[in-house]
Amino acid sequence: MLQYLIIQLDDTSTSYCHYYNGKRNRNLISIDTLKSGIMFGMKENLMIQYILPDYELPDEYYEVLESIDHSKIASSGSPYASVADVVVLNGWNKDYAFDIEGVYVLRVDKRTLFEKTSEILKVLKECARLNIVITDVEKFSDADFETYKSVLDSFSKELEALYVAGKTPQLNLLTDRMMLDGMNNCNAGSDSITLAPDGRFYVCPAFYLAPDDEDYGLGKSKVSVGSLASGLDIKNPQLYRLSHAPLCRNCDAYQCKRCVWLNRKTTYEVNTPSHEQCVVAHLERNASRALLMDIRKHGTFLPEKEDIKEISYLDPFDVRKEW
Amino acid sequence: MEKNDEIKDVDRGWLNGAAKTITFIVTKDCQLACKYCYLVGKNENERMTLETAKKAVDYILDNRSFFKEESVIWEFIGGEPFLEIELIENICDYIKIEMFRRNHPWFNSYRFNFSTNGINYHTSKVQNFIKKNWYHLSLGITIDGTKRKHDLNRIWKTKEMEMGFQPKPEDERGSYDDVVRNIPLWLSQFPKAATKVTISSADIPYIKESVLHLYSLGIHEVNINVVYEKVWKEGDDVVFENQLVQLADEIIDNGYYQDFACSFFSETIGKPMDIHSDNRNWCGAGRMLSIDAHGNFYPCTRFAQYSLRSKKARTIGNIGNGIDLNKVRPFIVLDRILQSPQECIDCEVASGCGWCQGENYDAADTPTAYQRATAICKMHKARVRANNYYWNKLYRKLEHEGVAREKAVKHVKSESSNTINC
């Protein structure tokens, strides 16, 4: 069921996820479109999330934004970073001043993550929550999987020490799975929808920001699913739901993003993840399992949660016949 | 006819379909322009080279981990494959040599498979190829039935057609006479061979006469199916059902069921299907491999561009980079329920109602293989009613003749009917 309306306020508003935003020319949503979008969200009972640009909005915009309960996403370079609910760091900046109460998205490629692990893990004690988004997860090789495993081990050791010391920072890659009892994915197209400056709806910002000529094989990446004028019109909506994701609905890597945009790009089907997305998610899941056991060695921790069971695979596709 | 207690069933294919099927689209050209043909992009330009075929063979034989099946069917299609008989012979020679040289298990378990329009069947090149490879050959000639039924759809291509002009009906030239002359030779070489009949809207009234005509030609197995495309008109299902009931009467009253089979009639169709135990995909797309003239790999030929009306070709790799396993995953995990609308899931006569994965993709609202096309719904239900009539009548007759039901059934399938006639 739809719960969130994400409003991309400008073409240049930051990416906060796997997709890349290469737009450099400002294209601010019109004030009328913004108002209509907010009205749509109110009528559909949707929680609104604004993705703010890196420049000051005209005053009349800010008044409209504040006319409804919402959350704000802004890049670290935005004038709204200080008031944002989620701040996005595009790339690693070791000199960035984190807020101990802050929630951050760190968008990094695998190489940066692997090379800067020791620096990045120090952030865990400088903020309330860190979401690490690997921007080229679809390019992981077998060697990268091994490296990623050791990276997760490093983060795990840091988290264990912090939790034993009584602190409770969150790292999406490791702590989410410990807390979850069921799938908690992105669910774009199912739980959330995006309104773009052109007044059209998109499954997520990635489907709007794709270059006009981008085509991974079956047609243009940029595809809208209706508009404010004509209404929301998601074709084959069932394919965005977990119930119609043949691998994911049987999976217990609950923290996985299950990114429909990556799915579309890598397998051509929005409901089918790539091998790389599955293995990365299961490395995280297994590292979460180990972390949970390690923390529990020091005393009672999340007593209401069961142990995460041991599994023998990293890609559910490899064991599909067992279901 | 000699008294026979048995009911002939359709053949379920070599090794019950367990072999890997690898299809070479050797040409996209054909002498005919069949009106129901799903190959909307046929042309004379895209001919596979031997070099491309060799690279494909090398890749396939080098990657046993991707091709684990114990047996293989090397299939050659077009257009009309026998337009490229010399190329095919060279490819087959290369396959045999390479399977032997690599000590590949498939050397001891392979077939060469062809479905031809039959026009060039008698030529010396084709006949030499058949003699050379007969032991490993499966070869079907497509003949649609009586002359008027066959010639209604299976007409010769003209230069004007290639330029986009359709001939007047009186100017159309059917191909029946050019095909039927080769049927005796074909049956003398492949006595158990089957033919494939396709039914579209216009030829429904000729189903009964066509099946009986094919029997009279000596073809003992007629695999017949309605097209999956959205071509059906109001009332077609009624005419279809009447034709099948009349056909049932002819088959039963004349005892043809003992030695002849028609795939329209099957004991396993028309039953509800369990959402768990009967959840297999109908189609084998993704478990097969098709290769086109450019060396592109497809999950099935129906995903190549020349087969698609409204969608882009859906490749799963190529001879240079190999198979992209991520592109294959959606096909392997696809099941019946995932792609079916609720109406199909709840259907009381669901078994035996099939689909073509490529047509599903082509007709879907988005570029997905996960949306089942249901254009044949009424036709399937009509088939089920006629099929019920057939078996009720047949078993009543057998009871009167004192033949035990169990003894009568020669090949009752253990699971749902998955006779796929693509």
Image (cartoon, rainbow, N blue to C red):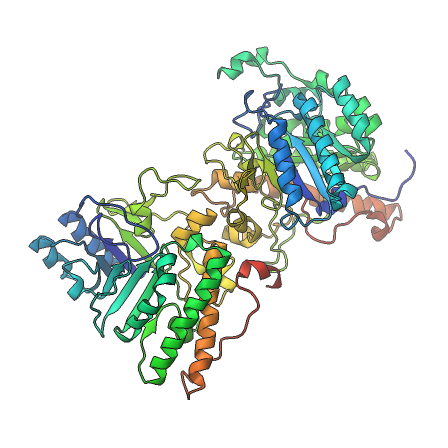
Left or right: B302 as drawn, with respect to B100: left
Front residue of this view, candidates B69 and B189 = B69
Front residue of this view, candidates B53 and A317 = B53
Residue displayed at 65% across by 16% down: B174
Farthest residue to the top: give it. B171
**Residue A82, relative to residue B121: is it above or below?**
below
The C terminus of chain B sits in image quarter: top right
Farthest residue to the left: give it. A59
Residue displayed at 54% across by 31% down: B294
Residue B264 visible, this angle: no
Left or right: B371 as drawn, with respect to A193: right
- State the image coordinates of residue A108 (x, y, percent, origin top left): 33, 58
Left or right: A207 as drawn, with respect to A23: right
Residue displayed at 61% across by 29% down: B51
- State the image coordinates of residue B311 (x, y, percent, origin top left): 46, 36
| Corner quadrant of residue A85 | bottom left
**Residue B82, relative to residue A275: is it above or below?**
above
The N terminus of chain B sits in image quarter: top right
Residue A79 visible, this angle: yes
- State the image coordinates of residue B312 (x, y, percent, origin top left): 46, 36
- State the image coordinates of residue B137 (x, y, percent, origin top left): 77, 33
**Residue A214, relative to residue B204: is it above or below?**
below
Number of marks drawn:
0
Front residue of this view, candidates A201 and B354 = A201
Farthest residue to the right: give it. B2
Front residue of this view, candidates A154 and B112 = A154
